[in-house]
């Protein structure tokens, strides 16, 4: 906690943090300490993180903390966040779910409801979260299906970029494979 207090003090001295930000940083630090020392439940911590996402000045930090504590138990606790009226809260749920998808803990189906989310911010976060997995057949098909219904050009561009990257990588791998077979056929040794 001393390190955190030092960071908050430096932030105030440098004029980067106003009184509200310093206060919220301290509150979040105390909540994390309480969670780590088992004096604060995960649900209580999640409520504090949600408050930051909705109207706090530390929304990005709250999102990072959520991703760190995200596990199967957490995603179950956050189930109602998927339908929250606030897009930042839905994005937070989506980030937790996509982390678990990356780790093979949850199916892609868990993310399907966000394909047609009313908020472009949420749909964009979905594409960004899945783009690194676009080479997987199910994710490629998911993004291609999303492309068919997406109206916003900036999101369509992100989808096309993710899909075209897969095609380039696939072609590069095929060329590499062909070159390797040619080398072996000619007896080439490195």
Image (tube, grey):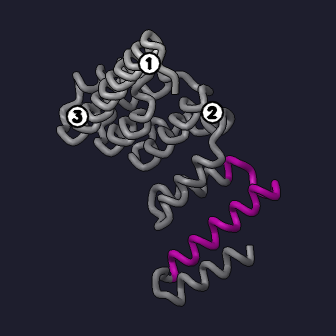
Whole-percent x, y for residue 104 in the image:
60, 26
Residue at the disc numbered 2: 76
> What distance separates the C-alpha of mark 3 from that of mark 2?
31 Å
Which label's residue is closer to the chain start, 2 or 1? 2
In the figure, residue 132 lies in which quadrant? top left
In the figure, residue 166 lies in which quadrant? top left
Residue at the disc numbered 1: 180
Q: Residue at x 55, y 57 (%)?
A: 62
Mark 3 nearby-residue class (10 Å; few <14, some 14–19, many ≥20): many
Q: Does dot 2 land on a helix, a strand or a loop?
A: helix
Magenta residues?
A: 19-44
Residue at the disc numbered 3: 156
Q: Residue at x 47, y 19 (%)?
A: 188
Q: Is residue 31 within the magenta segment? A: yes
From the viewer's perspective, is 34 left or right of 76? Answer: right
Q: Residue at x 66, y 37 (%)?
A: 71
Q: Please tell me which residue lies in front, 165 or 17.
A: 165
From the viewer's perspective, is 10 left or right of 173? Answer: right
Whole-percent x, y for residue 39 in the image:
81, 58
């Amino acid at each position: 906690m001393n390190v955190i207090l030092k960071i908050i003090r430096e932030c105030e001295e440098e004029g980067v943090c106003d009184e509200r930000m310093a206060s919220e940083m301290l509150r979040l630090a105390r909540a994390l300490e309480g969670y780590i020392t088992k004096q604060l439940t995960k649900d209580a911590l999640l409520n504090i993180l949600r408050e930051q996402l909705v109207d706090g000045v530390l929304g990005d930090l709250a999102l990072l903390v959520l991703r760190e504590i995200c596990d199967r138990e957490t995603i179950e606790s956050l189930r109602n966040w998927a339908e929250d009226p606030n897009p930042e809260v839905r994005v937070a749920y989506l980030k937790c779910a996509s982390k678990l998808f990356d780790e093979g803990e949850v199916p892609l189906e868990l993310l399907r409801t966000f394909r047609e989310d009313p908020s472009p911010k949420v749909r964009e976060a979905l594409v960004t979260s899945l783009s690194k997995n676009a080479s997987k057949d199910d994710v490629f098909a998911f993004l291609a299906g999303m492309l068919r219904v997406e109206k916003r050009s900036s999101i369509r561009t992100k989808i096309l970029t993710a899909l075209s990257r897969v095609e380039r990588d696939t072609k590069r791998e095929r060329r590499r494979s062909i070159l390797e077979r040619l080398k072996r056929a000619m007896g080439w040794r490195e």
